[in-house]
Amino acid sequence: EVQLVESGGGLVQAGGSLRLSCAASGITFDDYVIGWFRQAPGKEREGVSCISSGDGSTYYADSVKGRFTISSDNAKNTVYLQMNSLKPEDTAGYYCAAAPGLWALLKTDDYSYWGQGTQVTVSS
């Protein structure tokens, strides 16, 4: 059974930082791209960042470029999202997802498995 479990969300003031974790099981980690998505109430789910577990290639949405950093610890089957300089508009549920293959961008249809999400709230 494939499981993706997110953790690390919480409440933080604007300008602060959080680190999200996504622990994967039931998949051959190196064969997947792991992506982070977010969804705020009343808004569509949007892609934030993704990483190829195989070669470490990364991609960021323009809205988070320079503030968020995605990384992977293949020994732990875990992907991290370091979020710095957080803004109130970053408030959302954050979800990790796995897409089979060597590379994927942030198209939700490409991702086969999804976690349950972790809430990030940034106060002004």
Image (cartoon, rainbow, N blue to C red):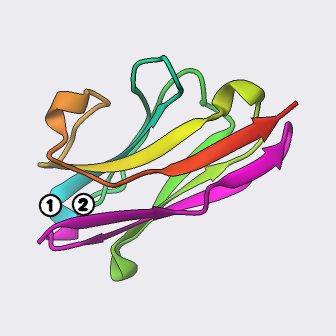
* Residue 68 or residue 5, whichever sits in front: 5
Quadrant assignment for the N terminus: bottom left
Q: Tag 1, which secondary structure?
A: helix
Marks 1 and 2, how far apart at CA: 6 Å
* Residue 92 or residue 102, whichever sits in front: 92
Mark 1 residue type = Asp
- Residue range (magenta): 1-29
Mark 2 sits on what residue?
54
Q: How many marks?
A: 2
**Residue in the picture at 37% in, 50% down:** 96
Percent x, y of residue 108: 25, 30
Using the image, determine if residue 44 lies above or below residue 68: above
Mark 1 sits on what residue?
31
Q: Tag 2, which secondary structure?
A: loop
Q: Contact, CB < 8 Å: mark 1 with mark 2?
A: yes
- 16 displayed left or right of 83: right
Characterize the local packing of mark 1: few (<14), some (14-19) or many (20 or more) Cα atoms within 10 angstroms.
Answer: some
Percent x, y of residue 68: 62, 42
Using the image, determine if residue 81 lies above or below residue 8: above
**Residue in the picture at 85% in, 36% down:** 14
For residue 110, what is the image quadrant?
top left
* Residue 17 or residue 50, whichever sits in front: 17
Mark 2 residue type = Gly
Percent x, y of residue 38: 47, 35
**Closer to us: mark 1 or mark 2?**
1
Residue 14 falls within the magenta-colored stretch = yes
- 67 displayed left or right of 53: right
Q: What label sits on residue 46 in the rendered view?
A: none
Characterize the local packing of mark 2: few (<14), some (14-19) or many (20 or more) Cα atoms within 10 angstroms.
Answer: some
